[in-house]
Structures are given as structure tokens and as C-alpha cells.
Image: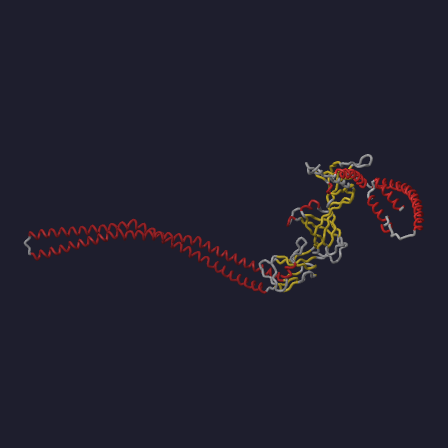
Amino acid sequence: MQRLVAITMFFFVCLLLGLPGAQSAVREASVEDSPSAAEQSPEKKPEEPGKASEETKEDDSEADSEKQESEESESDETKTTDKVADDDAKSDKKDDKKEKADNETDKKEKPDTKSAAKSGKPKKKAKEKPKPYKVKRDELKIEVDLDGTFVADEMEEVALRPEVWSKFTVLEAVEHGTEVKKGEVLVRFDDEKLKKDLAVEALSQSIGQLSLLQDEEEFPRIKRLLELSFEDAERRHEQTKEDYEYYLANDRPFTVKIANFRFKSAEEQLASAEEELKQLQQMYEADELTEETEEIVLRRQRFAVETAKLILELNKESRDYTLNVSLPRSDEYHKTSLEESELAYKQAKTAVEMGMTRKNYDMEKKRTARAKSMERHGKLLSDKGLMELRAPCDGVVYYGKCTNGKWSQIASLKAKLKPFGTATPKSVLMTIVKPGTLHIESSLSEKNLPDVTAGLKATLIPAADKELELEGKVAHVDTIPGASNKFRVDLEVDLAKAPEWLVAGMTCDAKIVTYENKEALVIPLDLVQTDKENEKIKYVMLVEAAEDGVEQEKPSRRNVKLGRKKGKIVEILKGLEEGDEIVKEEKKDEED
């Protein structure tokens, strides 16, 4: 009972001083020390009257003595408790400002709670002030993580670049990863078809040579024949032209004249015969000749008249035919003959000019074809040397070509470089990697390009052993983007600690240190505010202490200059000092 009273007095004093957790501690202590209902009220047994009165007197006396002792112990415990509470309050006030602020908040909330209880209206709970952040110096190290590939500094490609041959059937090839010496056979191809093609090409050259010699031998004779043909056509054209001119000047007019003359002669003969008949008839009528003689003469004369009429009609028809049919046909014939001779002349002239030119072109074409055949034959002989590909140096065989440190053709070339497989011309089949130093090739995104420069230190962690770290540095950074807008990065690596199993083609994680400051002034990024009118201006809310050591109720704005960022922290270059306390700016409630 005395211990319970002492503890109760101690925590009551703590409660008056505003120490946190006092109420809950009082309740716990009271629960632990208070006797249970069963212990305080044990079952009563029937007693004798005499004994009951005596026991009652003894109990009263004991209760009076216990009451007196408890009052003395309470006064001693109160003095001790007050002293301890004062010491604790002073230490808590100096060491923990936040607890004091919470205490003061609780004190302010108590009258509000009472007034709210009296008025019967619930009142909004006051918000707790955010805990200030103390600005401090810390190491700030910014790294760019890249995926890299180990690449040999020295390697030579084994390429299949034929001149003309395109069928490369594999007979045998060394396996990927085989160590070879300079001069060893790497790939052997089937050359039977190539040999046959070489024989055909040689025969074609011989035939072409003979054909060219024949053309060169016949060329002068062909040229002379063309010239003779032209001269004959020219002569015929001149004769036809002369004949046509003679026809127009002489034959045609004379033919017209003869036809007209014959017609006119027939007319005259008819007129003479008719006149003679008329005279005979008059004469015989006056004469005394016998009728028989007269009749004979007249009959003959009449026949002569009829003959003259027939001749006249015949000459008329002959004249009309000559003028209307024969002469136009003759005109057309002579005109066509002249045109044909002129065309034959021009054709012969063209044959001389173009025929000789064409013959020259044909011979030149054969010369060119023969030269190409000889060239192709020489290239086939050169391609015959590719039927066996040999190692250019000592090293390890890698299938395909190394592109940005990647060996992406290994799977496809394994299928091609097996027996009876077909290799692709104009491609790199193998690369001989020389044993020696390695470097790392990687690629960089656009956003990291300004931060990564030659000379920066890097840590290289092989994918095969995450515990192994190799030192390196950036050797070169491309300034022109490549595929997917990536920039190539070459890194040097120190192989002093490298294990023997580290070879070209293995991957690694490259961590490039782009910024390092061991005494950087850093704060959380979410405490940095942006000016509403000028987004370039950044500021924080600074908590400034008063002269008596009590912080101000409202923090003040302080503009800052930001440096590098890493995750959720940012470097402060200007505006704050180590030890300053800042908070996030509180937003006003809509109700306010």
C-alpha cells in the first residue's frame, strides 16, 4: 500500500510537469500493485463473539499505526519525487525539443477539450508540427551504371570475301573456342564445282579468241563488199534518174504525138475514101459504062470507106488508151524506178557507214568479252585460294564478328560451319582473339552523356563473380550517337587482379563515378520548394532559433542554390550552413 501511494505521487508530479507517458504509466502501476478483489475480500467464517471484539480492537490499533507510518513515508517520497522530476524535466527540456513541443500542444488541447465537452460540440484536433531536419555534411557519390562487355585489344578477322565465286560448301571447320596456331586450317570448302567452272571458262576464252581472229581477218573483205554494193547502187540510181528525165523530155511527148497523128491520119484516109466514092458515083451516073463495071468500082470504094472508118475507130481507141492508160502507167513506172533506185542508193550508203561501224563494235564487243572472261578466270583462280581458310595469327577462335563487344553470330554460324553447310560470301566467319589485354565496350544514354568524360574512374564487376571488383577508367566517349541514340564508351581495365577465367566476350557491370564530394551539404529533396512565379528559384523553410533558445513558431523562407542530385537527396551549394534546421512548408487548410 505504501509503495502504491509513493508511485502514485511520483507520477502525479510528472503529470503536473508535463512529462510524456505519465498517465499511462500511472494506470499500469496501479493495476500491478493493487490487490485483486479476491484478496481484499476473503471469505468470512463464523467466529465467536468474544474473539470478534478483540480482533476488531487489534485491527483498529494496527490501522492507526499504519496510517501514521504511511503519512510519514508519503512526505519523504514526495520530496524525493519532486527532486527527481525537476532534474528529469531540465534534462528533457534541453535534449528533446520535440517532446516539449508535444507537451505544450497537449496542454493547449486540454482546455479546448473541456470547452468542447461543455458546449457539446466536437472541436478539430490541432496538427502536430513537422519535425525539423538538421542540415549536415555527408559524402555524396554519384555513379552511372552501365552494362559492358570485355573485348580483346588485339584480334584479327577471318573473312570470306570472294571475287566471283558464291558457292562455298563446308567440308570441315574448327570448333568455336579452339586454340589455333598461325597457318592452321580453319575451314575447308568443296572445290569440285569451282574446278569445273575454271575449265569451262578456259574453253570459252579459246573460242572467243578464235571468233575474234576470224572477224579481224574478214573485216577488210566485208568492208570492200559494202563499198562495191554502194557503188553499184549509186550507179543504178544515176541511170534511172537519166532514164526518167529522158522519158519526160522525149519518150512521153513523142508517144502522145504519134497517137494523135495516127488518129488524124485515119480521119484523113476516111475523108479521102468517102470523097472518092462520091466522085465515082457522080462519074458513073454521067458515063455510059455498063452497070457491072460500075458496080465493081463502087463496091471496092465502099469497102475502102468502111476500112477507113474502122481504121479511124481503131486509131481513136489506140490514142485514148495511150493517153489515158499507157502513158500514166509509164509515168508511174519511171517515177517508182527512180524512187527505188534512190532508196537503194541511200541504203547502200548507210550500209557502208553503219555496217563498218557495227562490225567494229562487234569486234570490240568480242574483245571486251574475252577480256572479261580472262578477268573472271583470274578471279576464279584467286577464289580457289579461299577453299582453305587459315589462321592469320595465334589465338582463340570465335565464330562471327565482334560488334560493340557482342558476338551475336555464334549460333547461326555454328549451323553454317558444319559439314555440308553453306557459308555466306562477303562475311566474317571467324575472329582470332589474341591472348593479352582486354578493354570494355559499353553504350551510354543521352541523359548521362554530359556527365561521362574521358579519365573518370570506374569500378568493373564481372557478371561471373559479383564479389570481384576491378579498377578502370573511361578511355573514350563517342560524340555522335549510334543505334538507338546510344553513345559508345570505351573503358580501360586494370587486369592485375583479374582471374584467368576472364576472357573476351564476358559481361560486367561498370560503375563510373561522375561526381564525388566527401563533405557535401545535403538535404532531402522533398524539402526543396519551387517558387510559384519563377520555377528556376528554389527555396527551403528555415527554422531560426530565438535568443532564449526557443524556436520560432513560423519558419522563414531561404533561397538556395542546388547542386547534384542522387535519389531523394540533393546537394546545397549556397543558402544553408551545416547545423541549420529546415522543415517542409505547411499548406493552409481550405477552411482557414
Vertical comparison of 199 with 276: above or below: below
Q: Residue at x 9, y 51 (%)?
A: 282
According to the image, what is the colour scheme of the structure? secondary structure
Work out whether residue 508 or residue 267 is closer to the camera in this orientation and state it.
508
Picture coordinates of residue 156 (x, y %)?
67, 56
Q: Residue furthest front?
A: 49
Q: Can see residue 571?
A: yes
Of residue 39 and residue 443, the one placed in the foreground of this image is 39
Residue under the point 20% across and 51% down: 265
| 76 on left or right of 353 | right
Viewer can see residue 578: no
The furthest residue to the top = 547
Q: Quadrant of the C terminus?
A: top right
- Residue closest to the eye, 548 or 430: 548
Whether residue 133 is situated above or below residue 255 in the rendered picture: above
576 left or right of 304 in image: right
List x then y, in percent, for residue 72: 92, 42
Residue 330 screen position, x and y as percent = 30, 53
Q: How many marks?
A: 0
Locate residue 546, reporting x and y percent: 80, 35
Q: Residue at x 82, y 34 (%)?
A: 547
Q: Nearer the viewer, residue 590 or 183?
A: 590
Query: Would residue 283 be found to the left or right of residue 23 on screen?
Result: left
Location of residue 102 by image quarter:
top right
